[in-house]
Amino acid sequence: MAVRQINVERFSVISTKQSGDVVSSIEGQVGHPDIRKSLGEVSSAIDEDELKRTVVAAAGPTNLLEFARFDQGEVLRKETGETGPQMLRLLIGIPLTMRKMTKHVHDARSYAPVTILIDERTDGVHISYDRMTSFLAPYGESAATEVARELDATVENVLTKAATGAAL
């Protein structure tokens, strides 16, 4: 049995915008395909070109797409009412990026798609992301780390733009 310790770096930005505005900004930057249909098309792609066309067609302007969302604040609002905090977890990514990383580090599949947390608190809306480079660092694979750096930069740019209106 093997155990690997992974130290995770969390990128966080706090926004003074309303939670709904932050979410809308992120939604505008990522694709929102019918995920079952899209994943079916990925599975049935007969070659590399068809796979790329399928993925690119589903992705948003940042080449990211949303796989799932979980309204984690919903459970809290059952107690506090509709005025309770907004908490949302988004799973985003792009299959082509995941594939590039897993060619070198098979465990990268454990971390992709990535999670974005949007958490409304008294001091603002916290938007967080655990950096893919930190997940892959213990594996020492430079090719996978370079792909992860590009992914981190893209995601962090999306979050910064959502929080402030300005890109990195």
Image: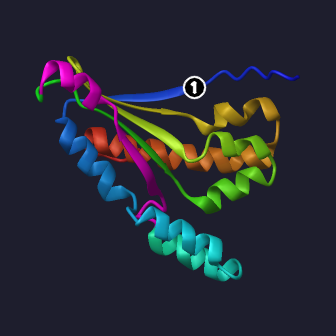
Task: Look at the image and give the residue range highlighted in magenta.
Answer: 59-81
What residue did someone put label 1 on? 9
Residue drawn at x 74%, y 47% is 144
Q: How many marks?
A: 1
Q: Position of residue 86 (x, y in %)?
A: 23, 31
Label 1: few (<14), some or many (≥20) within 10 Å?
Answer: few
Residue drawn at x 51%, y 26% is 10
Is residue 68 covered in magenta? yes
Classify mark 1: helix, strand or loop. loop
**On the rendered image, what quadrant is the C terminus found in?**
top left
Is residue 76 covered in magenta? yes
Question: On the image, which quarter does residue 41 sit in?
Answer: bottom right
Q: Position of residue 140 (x, y in %)?
A: 82, 35
Left or right placement of residue 66 versus residue 140 in this view: left
Of residues 79 and 136, the one nearer the viewer is: 79
Residue drawn at x 69%, y 82% is 46
Question: On the image, which quarter does residue 75 sit in?
Answer: top left
User: Is residue 144 placed above or below 75 in the rendered structure?
Assistant: below
User: Is residue 59 placed above or below 73 in the rendered structure?
Assistant: below
